[in-house]
Image (cartoon, rainbow, N blue to C red):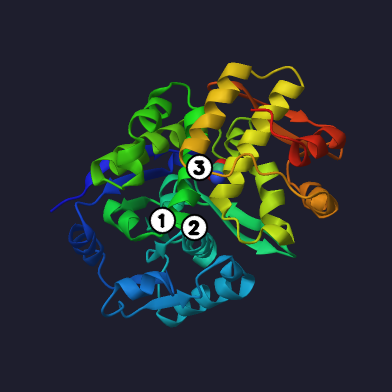
Amino acid sequence: MTMKTMMTTQLENGRETQVLLADGLKDLSSHLGEYGRNVLWVFDTNTAKLFKQLPPSNVVLESGESSKTFSSLERILGAALDEGLARDGRIIGFGGGVVCDMAALAASVYMRGCRLTLVPTTLLAMVDASVGGKTAIDFKGMKNMVGSFYPASEVLLSIDTLRTLNDKEFLNGLAEVIKHALLSQNEELYKFLLIKKNEILSRQPEALTTLVELSLMVKKWFIEQDPTETKGIRQFLNLGHTFGHALESSSHYGMWGHGACVAWGTCRALEAGIAIGIGDKAYASGATKLFKSYGYEIDYRIGRGDWIEFRDHLLKDKKKADGKVLFVLLEKQGTASLHPLELQLVQHLVIAKPIF
Ligand code: GLY
């Protein structure tokens, strides 16, 4: 059986990513079986468990963010060399965002670039990490500090894997989907999220397939316009991430997942837009309600004693002009812009009472 093409993205230098949809895990396995022997698989300790017997050439990383290191990169490159992978060989990353980022980074530098297939198994990796070519490791305590742009030639999706995720992991990805809905040039995804909430939360395969496809269409629009984030367009995909990453990195909030932080951060960005007079109040209120309806803790505010640590993480953000952190704010559906914010306003937004 051949897999269906869900989407194709055209990036710079003629690089194309084909996103293919499998009709279940069997279909996926038979497609992967066609690659033959000149391949190296990268798993993590979770995705390795999905196989009764692992393919012969493999690296299994410890699951989690702590694997995004130079030593994991060295392990993958060392295994590729030991297996005699040639430049026309292929690295296959099978897992969530960490596996996708690591496999892609290794493929981008192995013999100056070998073939790359990604099989994202989480919602977050399906709608974000696997498409668009960003690869990275964390460095000196900072997320994604060292990396490259190296799009996979193929991204293979099997929607069944989403049914195996725990709720926290599912909500990690769903926050990025809702973020895409707000950034989209049309309201299709936003309306789908409003109408199909029950089907999405109960993970009905048809609803999930449409959800992933609509979300990827939004990402495609941004990455095709600005593949290497140099034109001031792709950075809008970071909506909610400056506030969100600061929360995620603050020690008291370690139990909050990435998605919970992004949802919270997006709502703070919507409020910031209103505070500086560019945001549409009715739109911000509706978007905040949408996040709440999916169970995110939007009204939460940090303790006063956590502000200094939060601020210090905020100031490490990569998006800066004249030393000031820039925030992606949203005026209304699909209209984002970058703004520096006074720290006093940020402090007010993150520790004050909710507006909505
Ligand atoms: N995750 C945002 C981007 O791919 O640009």
Real-space Cα distance between discs 1 and 3?
12 Å
Q: Position of residue 80 (x, y in %)?
A: 45, 75
Give the amino acid at mark 2.
Gly
The residue beneath circle 2 is: 97
Report the residue at 58% width, 24% height from top: 285
Mark 1 vs ligand 1: CB below 8 Å? no
Please tell me how crowded label 2 is: few (under 14), some (14-19), or many (20+) other residues with Cα within 10 Å. Answer: many
The residue beneath circle 3 is: 176
The residue beneath circle 1 is: 122
Would you identify the image quadrant in which residue 65 lies?
Answer: bottom right
Viewer-nearest residue: 93 or 46? 46
Tell me whether the residue at label 1 lies in contact with that at label 3, contact meaning CB atoms closer than 8 angstroms.
no
Mark 2 vs ligand 1: CB below 8 Å? no
Which is closer to the viewer, label 2 or label 1? Answer: 1
Left or right for 75, reference 126: right
Mark 3 vs ligand 1: CB below 8 Å? yes
Please tell me how crowded label 3 is: few (under 14), some (14-19), or many (20+) other residues with Cα within 10 Å. Answer: many
Viewer-nearest residue: 6 or 141? 141
- Sequence-first disc among 2 and 3: 2
Kindly tell me whether residue 225 is visible in this rendering.
no
